[in-house]
Amino acid sequence: MDEGGALAPVPVSASRTVRSELVFPNDANPAGNIFGGRVLMLMDVVGAIAARRHSRRQVVTAEIDSVDFLRPIRVGECIELVAEVSAVGRTCMEVEVRAYVEDLAVRQPCWDPAHFDASQP
Ligand SMILES: CC(C)(COP(=O)(O)OP(=O)(O)OC[C@H]1O[C@@H](n2cnc3c(N)ncnc32)[C@H](O)[C@@H]1OP(=O)(O)O)[C@@H](O)C(=O)NCCC(=O)NCCS
């Protein structure tokens, strides 16, 4: 913070958070596809880490944009989540979370970017 009280700018790269997980049978439905709720949980966690890296404050999730599940993720595949703070307000932040599925031979996006709004509690 400078003498006028303005916060120092933080580059998007400072909040970048990446998490990779193998999909195990207990993450999946009987058809062998990962549960959507499990994916949302992983996206929420990486989004929260990115928001805390940006702000260095405690955060809560206030809102999640709609999420489109474009293709299934199968047991044995790898899911990778990439989160970055994409916009800031006065006390709130918008975090973009991208999800990819990888069979460890090919890596593809599996959802449209979702936006998480995290506000200080
Ligand atoms: C999020 C929460 C702290 C906002 O409280 P509030 O009294 O509405 O706070 P304010 O009105 O002061 O808003 C604070 C900021 O958050 C933003 N905000 C509040 N609700 C929002 C929403 N639903 N979506 C997007 N932004 C939101 C406001 O625009 C404001 O931004 P700004 O300071 O940059 O202008 C409160 O609703 C809360 O605690 N919710 C529960 C969060 C939680 O438990 N999440 C876990 C998952 S259930």
Image (cartoon, grey):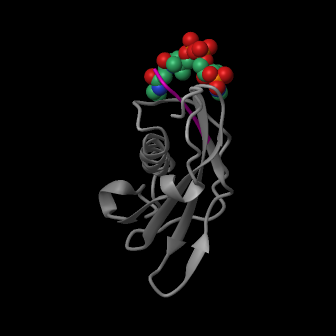
Q: Looking at the image, is 74 positioned above or below residue 95?
A: below
Q: Looking at the image, is 50 positioned above or below residue 30?
A: above
Residue ID at (49%, 55%):
14
Magenta highlight range: 116-121
Residue ID at (48%, 51%):
39
User: Quick one: 86 or 71, which is closer to the camera?
Assistant: 86
- What predominant SS class does the magenta segment belong to? strand
98 with respect to 48 (left or right):
right
Q: Position of residue 11 (x, y in %)?
A: 58, 54
Q: Position of residue 50 (x, y in %)?
A: 47, 48
Q: Position of residue 70 (x, y in %)?
A: 66, 61
Q: Residue furthest front?
A: 3
Residue ID at (45%, 30%):
59
User: Quick one: 121 or 4, which is closer to the camera?
Assistant: 4
Residue 46: in magenta span: no
Q: Looking at the image, is 21 positioned above or below residue 29?
A: below
Residue 118: in magenta span: yes
Residue ID at (54%, 59%):
13
Q: Position of residue 43 (x, y in %)?
A: 49, 49
Q: Quadrant of ligand 1?
A: top right
